[in-house]
Amino acid sequence: MVIVLKQIATEKNIKALISELQARGLSTNYSEGTSQTVLGIIGDTTKIDADDLQRLSSVESVKRISEPYKTVNRKMHPDDSIIKINDNVKIGEGFFNVIAGPCSVESEDQIIEVAQRVKKAGATLLRGGAFKPRTSPYAFQGLEAEGLDLLLKAKKATGLPIVTEIMNLIHLDLFADVDVIQVGARNMQNFDLLKVLGKCDKPILLKRGLANTFEEWLMSAEYIMAGGNHNVILCERGIRTFETFTRNTLDISAVPVLKKLTHLPIIVDPSHATGMRWLVEPLAKTAVAVGADGLMIEVHNDPSKALCDGAQSLDPDQFDVLMSDVKRRVQFEGKIL
């Protein structure tokens, strides 16, 4: 349920209303936007009489939310959320960020070299896998804790905030110095993991599952936000369809659809979406055109020798070319990169 407050509503009126709702066992979400102030009610609202609320002098209107996701719903929070990574990096409407780096951290020299190159080209965050989910049990699984240490060395060398994927709750303590924790496609509905991440104070990058609907994706975000962590970034990385030419099928419609349904920022990962480096550039441009808040691009200093996903990774020179074009397009859209 959403209560739209009148502009004349006083702080005293609002506090009294919140206290009354909380006394009924309901939680509230206060959102003061540019055009209207909204009070979201979360919980069993079936026994609340909307007409009684409507009669209050401070209430403009009362609406029930039919969708199962509440906190992530744009009706609950009309203005776009801006997720702060640190004092310099913000993700959301008006800002555009590029997260770049190798699929897997392989060595200190590799990750630092890539970090320096992607930063020079304009990337604002560094990605790199320390724990790698692989379809085959015989494939490279990542350097694990050592990989996290190497990411932190690259962060120290470049100042870039780091983004890396968590696979298991038992590793959470190792992520204390990670700036953004990524939840991969295979873990999008690992609800125990999402609940715990909902209690931490770090931004969470939530990738769409391999065959999940928008509603299922938003419900996973709801799990995180219901725990109190509202710093969620959505990432469209392609879904499984009947087409076999590409690794996945990039659902570019996810960007405008999610912009309508939720206030959370959404970025696009064209690398995992296709599995082919020659498709990364055109799809990255498309993502900018449809209003994405950022990109996640895989970059390796020597893709032919990469231990993971070399076929979809750009080399630093190719990334330079892509970033030159992206910068022009982002500036044309009036966003800050």
Image (cartoon, rainbow, N blue to C red):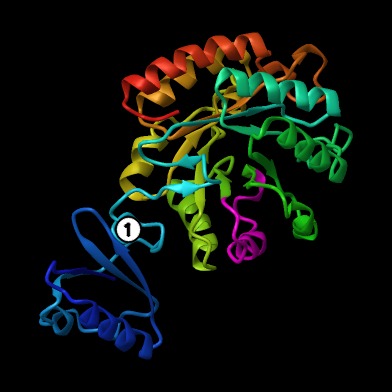
x and y, in percent, of residue 107 in the image: 86, 28
x and y, in percent, of residue 284 in the image: 48, 21
In the rendered image, which quarter contains the N terminus?
A: bottom left
In the rendered image, which quarter contains the C terminus?
A: top left
Could you classify mark 1 by the number of other residues whose Cα lies within 10 Å: few (under 14), some (14-19), or many (20 or more)? many
Which residue appears at 62% of the width and 24% of the height? 119
Count of numbered badges drawn on the protein: 1
Mark yes or no: residue 337 visible: yes
Residue 103 vs residue 64, the one in the foreground: 103
| Rendered position, 29 above or below 276 | below
| Rendered position, 66 above or below 166 | below
Relative side of 323 to 33, left or right? right
| Rendered position, 88 above or below 31 | above
Relative side of 32 to 230, left or right? left
Where does the magenta region start and end?
186-203
Which residue appears at 71% of the width and 36% of the height? 155
Which residue appears at 41% of the width and 21% of the height? 286
| Rendered position, 298 above or below 64 | above
Which residue appears at 14% of the width and 81% of the height? 51
x and y, in percent, of residue 189 in the image: 60, 55
Residue type at mark 1 is His
Identify the residue position indicated by label 1 in the image: 77
Mark yes or no: residue 134 visible: no
Membership of 192 in magenta stretch? yes
Relative side of 131 to 217, left or right? right
Relative side of 337 to 297, left or right? left
